[in-house]
Amino acid sequence: MNMSLPRIENGSRRDFLRGAVQAAGGLTLAIYLPGTQAAEPPAAAPEFEPNAFVRIGADGVVTVIAKHVEMGQGAYTGLATLVAEELDAAWAQVRVEGAPADAGRYNNLAFGPFQGTGGSTAIANSWEQLRKAGASARAMLVSAAAAQWQVPAGEIGVSEGVVSHGARKASFGELAPAAALLPVPAGVPLKSAQDFKLIGKQAPRKDSADKVNGRAQFTQDLHLPGMLTAVVAHPPRFGATVKSFDATKAKAVKGVVNVVRIPTGVAVLAQDTWSAKKGRDALKIVWDESKAFKLGSEEILARYRTLARQPGLVAHNSGDADAALARSGRVLRASYDFPYLAHAAMEPLNCVVRIGDNECELWYGAQFQSIDQSSVAALLGLPPEKVKINMLYAGGSFGRRASKDADYVLEAVHIAKASKSRAPVKMVWLREDDMKGAYYRPAFHHALEASLGEDGRPTAWRHRLAGQSILAGTVFGGMIKDGIDAVSVEGAANLPYGIPAMRVELHSPSDIPVPVHWWRSVGSTHTAYSTETFIDELANSAGQDPVAYRLALLDQHPRHAGVLKLAAEKAGWGQPLAVGANGARRGRGVAVHEAFGSYVAEVAEVTVSADGSFSVDRVVCAVDCGIVVNPDVVRAQVEGGVGFALSAALHGAITLKDGAVEQSNFHDYAPIRITEMPRVEVHIMPSAEKPTGIGEPGVPPLAPALANALAAATGKRVRSLPIRTEELKA
């Protein structure tokens, strides 16, 4: 992070959506959509609650208010495209600003009355909403011009931010004051796809330039007057607490201002991050580990394996899989182990807090504003509207900042409250804090069985999973139905293959306190691996081509089949691979999976040496994510998903020993290096369907495609991750 950037002034943006004409003569547009509840409804349309997404200044700058955080996934660019398309604005005149915490206006339509970014929903839930915002603004500008020029509105054109009628022309900025006095039109028509000028075209990202030139503001860049920086000493084991501590040496460190005890540990406040870290290192803490968790990773997985030998809660049942398996003479079995995984985003967790008189203001890369706002309000005894959240850029998240219980935000507020100071506080997690004390993708064990008929196709399929629930005990607990955490079995309970009898069962032990959380593509991170490598084994046992085998079972799922065919075609499936040098073995593998409404197939090509070391040479991806708003962003997200998934497949594992996390930084929780990154080709399926998610769906197919390629090259199946080269030796 650039620490020498201009400071953000300690001003509030809470009044920026008043909807009135500003002194500069600008226009703030509120659009009214059905299905929302009104709070202080405007007189013009009392039955609708305003959703303010567009602001046009006298200088002609169009500001799009983004309700979704920009954490590298391209949300700002996509949301701005939707508005600019219908507004007919010039792309260069469009800016993007993060929305405040206000679920009444900025709720995620996929989540209900809840503001947040997640589930690859940013574009999907905004598709019509922001296009209507742009179209409404355009109609108001046209009406203003029609009134001034005394011509019919239907004869007026708009292009590249200029409104025109014959020789008459006016910019958005010139018309904004008059447009601001007009009522917001209802039922504005939207463009047909054939008329799109920006949607579906490549346009420069709205965040790239600022991130390159240093103007982008991340939490670490923020410096408020008198601000202190806090670093926290967390317990070495989950469930441990502070018994006592001695802060004498910590307070002697130059720059240290205060040391306070909070529910999650002991915080050191200092003039800067380095002083706070040195002060934390000097603390003498006695931990109470009487209730600490002390099992190791292998003991946890051993327990899961035992559970998977017993029937679990039924997540899916069609036909009689148990009976079909019992009477079959040809049954294949496989079991899989998946470790805990860290999110390891480039920017560790952080948050700036200022507690004032009957108010609290925060600055950070906010992902779940509704949970954070209500949690902070409850802690401080404030009404939620008195908790102001300023949304900054986030340097990655992969799910971590979408905290189910506002853990890191509450920690920052606890520090500010305990310090009994009016000084703003910036809480900073160092990489080691993020790695050792964070929330993880759950560890899981899978056990699969399938019977094959005379034609080699599966006649029955039984899948048992054992692992911690992400949703249990959270505000999302209502999503658990009949004991089944839907995100634990997604990708397994909805397996698309046409199998006559299928049964999926789940064990979710509730007495393991390792904190777990959604991780990029959530349950599909492990279900896609087990199902797609196992279906590959079935094809191999049947002596059939893996692509043809899958296609025969996907006759009821054309979008799965479509991306599978496209990926296979572009990869040259069926054509022999070039012979490897020095006896190296070559292999090609495939996997297809649906996640967040999008369909992705990937083909991986590998070269394996005699000692088991291997390279991933090429990955060919086919994507069906509905209408594409920005093809370059789609390609970037799929390419990034491949790299993210490959890091986990090759190196990723959070392991526990006696209850303590063994990894601490990138030296022992390694991302892939540039030399390990394959050539990635992304092919996008044309579609007329509404947009679906793209931030996560590229992740699940990579690891199974890679494992299937390794099996094709070596004949050896990889049934635990990360992949160990010793298992692949000739």
Image (tube, rainbow, N blue to C red):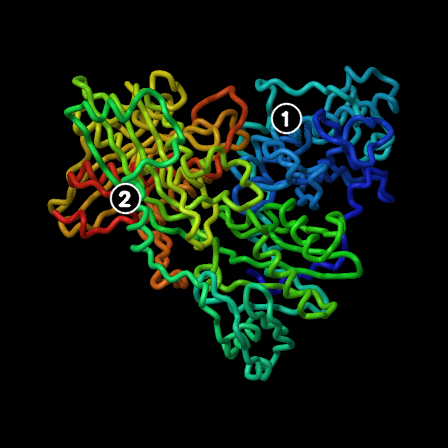
| Left or right of 508 in this view: 480 | right
Around disc 1, counting alpha carbons within 10 Å, would you say few (fewer than 14), some (14 to 19), or many (20 or more)? Answer: some
What amino acid is labelled 1 in the image?
A: Glu
Which residue is at 11% across, 45% downward?
583
Disc nearer the start of the sequence (2/1): 1
**Is residue 618 visible to us here?**
no
Q: Percent x, y for residue 361?
A: 72, 56
| Left or right of 309 in this view: 288 | right
In front of the other: 692 or 510 = 510
Q: Circle 1 sits in a helix, a strand or a loop, which is it? A: helix
Per the image, the residue denoted by label 1 is 128
In front of the other: 113 or 19 = 113
**Is residue 529 visible to us here?**
yes
Can you say whether 430 is above or below 66 in the image? below
The alpha-carbon separation of the residues under discs 2 and 1 comes to 40 Å
What amino acid is labelled 2 in the image?
A: Val
Q: Percent x, y for residue 542?
A: 17, 25
Q: Circle 2 sits in a helix, a strand or a loop, which is it? A: strand
Would you identify the image quadrant in which residue 354 lies? Answer: bottom right
Which residue is at 28% across, 42% downward?
336
Can you say whether 255 is above or below 118 in the image? below
Per the image, the residue denoted by label 2 is 616
Would you identify the image quadrant in which residue 237 lies? Answer: bottom left
Can you say whether 297 is above or below 703 in the image? below
Which residue is at 54% across, 67% downward?
265
Would you identify the image quadrant in which residue 562 lies? Answer: top left
